[in-house]
Amino acid sequence: MVKLTGRQREFLSRFLDIYRGTKQPIHYTQLAEKVGVSELTAYDMLRLLEERGLVASEYVLPRDGGPGRSSIVFYPTEKAAKAMAQQAGEDWDKKEWERVRERILQALDERKGAYQNLLDEILLRIPKRKSPMLYVTEMITAIFLQLHQLREEVSVNGLFPDLRLLGLPGELGLTALPGLTVGLTMVEKANQHVARLLLSYTQKYQDHLARLSAENKKRVSDFAQEVMNIVGM
């Protein structure tokens, strides 16, 4: 298995996302602009990934066929997607994730605020989840359900601002979300067993979330928005 640093993994993930969108090899200067790094950094990183068999390059002539220097463009190899899946432990089944998503949203809609049994079920499932997508999805649900049950209490104590001020349901907010579990342990009316369980799951949640592709982060972000809408947060 190809081992990548966090920085290399993030760069490759962004490169894959951009390539999937354009379906065209990309020049390192364009990639640098889209990723937000210097041209030299982008070039060096692409060359490093090429040495590891994750990226390939080719020279192309000017588009108009006129005189001028050829330029180098890069594209991912088949090995790249496999390496990202291995690095992230992201051997996930999209259909299975959709089924879990639908079951959760349906349960939230049907139970009309009586969510304790659903929360208990999810808390039991979370540590058994091998898929990072499912782990993150159910962790988000569990935190929102606990916050929903304690909404009035935490509001009175001023522990939490409006969730949207934290950047929810965007990626930044999802990263900050587990921090609220620390506050839950300080709420007198909170179920401390539940609060401690959530707290014990936060590190793995953060690790899994950081390793998801940009595409999958968007999926869980959209899911978080749906949960917030149903439970009225």
Image: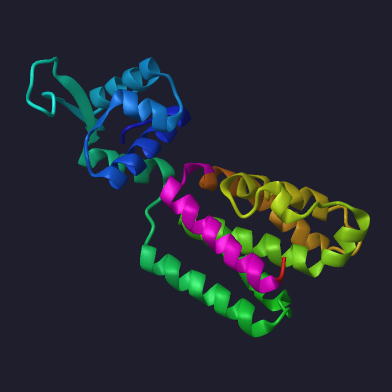
Quarter of the rendering occupied by the N terminus: top left
The residue sitting at 62% across, 59% down in the picture is 140
- Foreground residue, 158 or 180? 158
Residue depicted at x 88% and y 57%:
187
Q: Point out residue 105 in the picture as x, y percentages from the top left corner.
A: 56, 74
Compared with 130, 8 (above or below) is above
Q: Please tell me in which quadrant of the rendered image residue 87 appears.
A: top left
Answer above or below: position of 151 versus 213.
below
134 horizontally vs 108: left or right: left
Determine if the magenta segment contains residue 73: no
Could you say which is closer to the camera, residue 36 or residue 55? 36
Q: Position of residue 79 (x, y in %)?
A: 24, 39
Question: In the rendered structure, does residue 228 fall within the stretch colored magenta?
Answer: yes
Residue name at image x 39 percent, y 37 percent? 14
Characterize the magenta stretch by its predominant secondary structure.
helix
Q: Is residue 162 visible?
A: yes
Q: Quadrant of residue 124?
A: bottom right
Q: Position of residue 16 (x, y in %)?
A: 33, 40
Do we see residue 5 in this rendering? no
The coloring applied to the image is: rainbow
What residue is rendered at 69% in x and 60% in y? 143
Q: Position of residue 81 (x, y in %)?
A: 29, 43
Number of marks drawn: 0
Q: Is residue 63 above or below residue 152?
A: above
* Quadrant of the image containing the C terminus: bottom right
Left of 116 or right of it: where is 172? left
Q: In the rendered structure, which segment of residues is drawn in magenta?
A: 210-231
